[in-house]
Amino acid sequence: MPVIEVGRVCRKVAGREAGRYCVVVRIIDDNYVEITGPKELTGVRRRRVNVKHIVPLPEKLDIPEGASDEQVLEALKQTDLYPKLLEEKEKREKRKGKPKS
């Protein structure tokens, strides 16, 4: 069983988005994967990252390869992780002083 696979929830450990949750949507090669937050929930935009910069978590979503942000968001809503992600989003917005939408 591969550790990094499509649908695996991960946490970024490097870069400007370090500490935020993301989901693997496509495996590019042995060293790179495409991830998304999605941005409106976790603040992580869809991008290519080195697998050394993410830590896989036990949660795995049932999404197809190359899933859209909307599909990922719907899959996240079915998990126990979703309330935690909403709470982190509110904390981020509070720190930045953004009004709630």
Image (cartoon, rainbow, N blue to C red):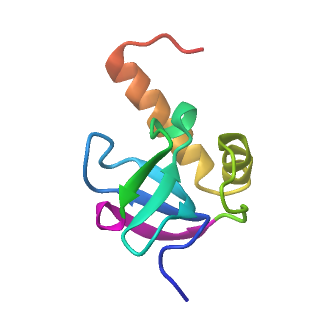
Name the outermost residue toward the front: 29
Magenta residues: mostly which secondary structure?
Answer: strand
Whether residue 82 is situated above or below residue 31 in the rendered picture: above
21 inside magenta stretch: no
Closer to the camera, 95 or 27? 27
Q: Position of residue 34 (x, y in %)?
A: 49, 55
The residue sitting at 42% across, 22% down in the picture is 93
**Image quarter hosting the N terminus:** bottom right
The residue sitting at 69% across, 52% down in the picture is 67
Q: Which residues are magenta?
A: 51-60
The residue sitting at 61% across, 68% down in the picture is 60
Closer to the camera, 77 or 26? 26
Closer to the camera, 16 or 101? 16
Exactly how many numbered labels are in the figure? 0
Left or right for 85, reference 74? left
Q: Position of residue 31 (x, y in %)?
A: 36, 70
Whether residue 55 is situated above or below residue 99 in the rendered picture: below
